[in-house]
Amino acid sequence: MSGISLKSATGRWILFSTILATSMVFIDGSALNVVLPSLQTDLKATGADVFWVLNAYLLVLAAMMLPGGSLGDKFGRKKIFAIGIVLFIIGSLLCGLSPNVKFLIISRLIQGLGGAFMIPGSLSLITSLIKDGERGKAIGTWSAVTTIVSIGGPVIGGILGDHGLWRYIFFINIPVGIISLIVLWLKVPETSNEEDKGRVDIPGALLLVAGLAAITYSFLRFPAVGISDWQVNTFLIFGVLDLVLFLIVEKRSKSPMIRLTLFRNRNFTGLNLLTFFLYGALGGGMLFLSLNLVQIQGYTQTESGLTFLPFTFLLGLFSRYIGSLSDRLGSRIFLIAGPFTVGLGFLFLSFIEQTRGASDYWLTFFPGIILISIGMLLTVVPLTTSVMTSISQNYSGISSGVNNAVSRIAGIFSNAAFGALALLLFTNLVVQQLEKSDFRETQKNNIISETINLGNAQVPADTFTPDQKKQIKQVYRNAFLDAYQTILIVCTVMCYSSALIAYFMVEGKKVEEKQIPA
């Protein structure tokens, strides 16, 4: 069934159900950034544990998104989308009930699997059901709303976190998911690719999960034991070899999870490279900005969440206009200007040191956040529309799966790499400052032992004078700010790389289906 108008009741129900369900995935991917301090304290989690809470979700989301899209194309997009919602509800319930951080990490894996079926399923339902003339508008609406709720997630998280209710970030998914299921089942027609007779590439998915998990473990382990440690190197080598084997399996498979022939097209490759660098920078930069605001600058979690409201307002008000404008002018100019502007925002934020708290927000963090918001406004809809119209509609699940997987893989690498870099820089900077102090050797070792908690590092239980406690807090604060500034400079470089990729590789006009083999 195809050719449904957005003005019809069925068209509106399709858009409503897909947006409502996938909103859960995007909110849970962003809301935790703000409540990490509360979560870390309540569950007695280390800095590395915190990054695993984020990456366990992203690992499965990234690796299973591609077979999730294929499953929908083969067995029915509505059916697989519904299964994803059920899994996400179950995972959310378990996350909310987690007694410790290990249970939470395992529960996040289940959430990630549900999300992996939902994201490509939602876009492929829209692409395969909505008629040609309105498909771009539908994709733009989906992209704008899901981005708004993703960026609005920290506001919800901040309010709940400040009231000791961070678990309700997960519990609110249950009624939302049930409503989505009912609407999907009653109002949305089924659709699939009847020409797809191949098998689902489970070996490829397992190799991708294993490779990404091994590299993530290696990155997050090396700050504690050193780059020469056998575990670090063994897992890193294993992860790289796994990913190489994954590419070999995909090339030889009759039904690959990802069709490597797609990347022969310069435009499709450019769009995904741009996505990797931009969303890697955005994920890592926003995470450390949130930690800085709460743990160093003294913002409440609610205040930290509210700092992201400019994203919500700008994308909510102007996304459709940008979508229409890019249809007329072509996407290339937006995909150059957008990442460049995001980079300017990160560069501005990198120069901000200690402030007096939320009262200084308007003259410190606000201008940088506005620049990032404008940059993402210019990028989100043109990028999503370009990707979704780049190959045949029969493979819309694979198309959305590839690009969304790329954005999640970018998040995994940025969280792992930036987490490792931050822990390493933080520890080394604390050690350097302590070398100039007159603390006893045992005191220095106790102070250094707290660096595994990163911005949540506390003055250790020792006999310190009030002045010494104040000095230790300043040491931790200075070290975190230096690490934070380095990470934001890296984010700036990644954004500028995205703009350069768009300039040299991305076409401005709509890509014809025949240009990219499916």
Image (cartoon, helix red, strand yellow):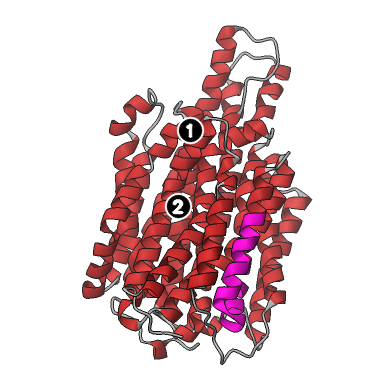
Q: Callout 2 environment at 10 Å: few (<14), some (14 to 19), or many (20+)?
A: many
498 relative to 363 in the view: left or right:
right
29 relative to 329 in the view: left or right:
right
> Can you see residue 348?
yes
Q: Do the residues labelled 1 and 2 touch (CB within 8 Å)?
A: no
Above/below status of 143 relative to 427: below
Q: Mark 2 points at which residue?
A: 150
Provide the secondary structure element on which disc 2 rests: helix
Which residue is found at the position 47% from the left and 59% from the top? 20
Provide residue 227's location: percent of width, then percent of height. 68, 48
Q: Mark 1 points at which residue?
A: 301
Above/below status of 374 relative to 302: below
Which residue is found at the position 56% from the left and 41% from the top? 422
Quarter of the view holding residue 101 = top right
**Start-end of magenta stretch:** 64-90
> Can you see residue 428?
no
Question: In the image shown, does 69 or 186 lie closer to the viewer?
Answer: 186
Question: In the image shown, does 162 or 187 lie closer to the viewer?
Answer: 187
